[in-house]
Amino acid sequence: MNGTSPSIDAVSKAIIEQLQEDGRRPYAAIGKAVGLSEAAVRQRVQKLLDQGVMQIVAVTDPLTVGFRRQAMVGITVEGDIDPVAEALAALDAVEYVVITAGSFDLLAEIVCEDDDHLLELINKRIRALPGVRSTESFVYLKLRKQTYTWGTR
């Protein structure tokens, strides 16, 4: 997502909520729910995608597609946080990066094939980044909840 905040009207928010419930919902059905034509919904969805307001993706359970290890890594940085955040975001195994306030400067969620992959990523890639002072890993044992249906405000 980008750093700017595009203006989102109530109709676009309603479209987003429809797609959060079902990312494969037909534009015609969305149009009926929000009071627009199918073509108008298609146009608005494309604009929301182009602006970086949303993405439409297939969300999987990593375990079922060959990734047996997930972890959250807390990272403490010396100096400027941005270059470290950008370098983390460029790593394929990193799902998201968050700049935080608190005990860590950054949190990075990573999805790996196995423990060897996790160790290589943390030890050889993340800890080797200039500016990384320390890391703390939180290995996921079981995923209890993951939703994307929080709606809009």
Image (cartoon, grey):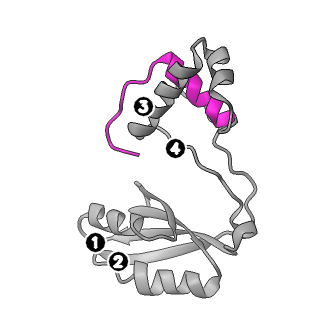
Neighbour tally class for label 3: few under 14, some 14-19, many 20 plus, Cα within 10 Å: some
> CA separation, marks 2 and 1?
6 Å
Pick out the residue farthest to the top: 35
Nearer to us: label 1 or label 4: 4
Report the amino acid beneath label 1.
Glu
Residue 63: x and y in percent read 73, 69
Name the residue nearer the viewer: 133 or 15. 15
> CA separation, marks 2 and 4?
33 Å
Q: Which residue is tagged 2?
A: 133
Residue 68: x and y in percent read 70, 75
Q: Does residue 126 sit above or below 123 in this rendering?
A: above
Q: Which residue is tagged 3?
A: 47
Nearer to us: label 4 or label 3: 3
- What secondary structure is marked by label 2? strand
- Sooner in the amino-acid sequence: mark 1 or mark 3: 3
Residue at figure coordinates x 50%, y 75% from the top left: 136
Say if mark 2 contacts mark 1, CB within 8 Å: yes
- Sooner in the amino-acid sequence: mark 2 or mark 4: 4
Looking at the image, residue 48 sits to the left or right of residue 63; the answer is left
> CA separation, marks 2 and 3?
40 Å
Neighbour tally class for label 1: few under 14, some 14-19, many 20 plus, Cα within 10 Å: few
- Sooner in the amino-acid sequence: mark 4 or mark 3: 3
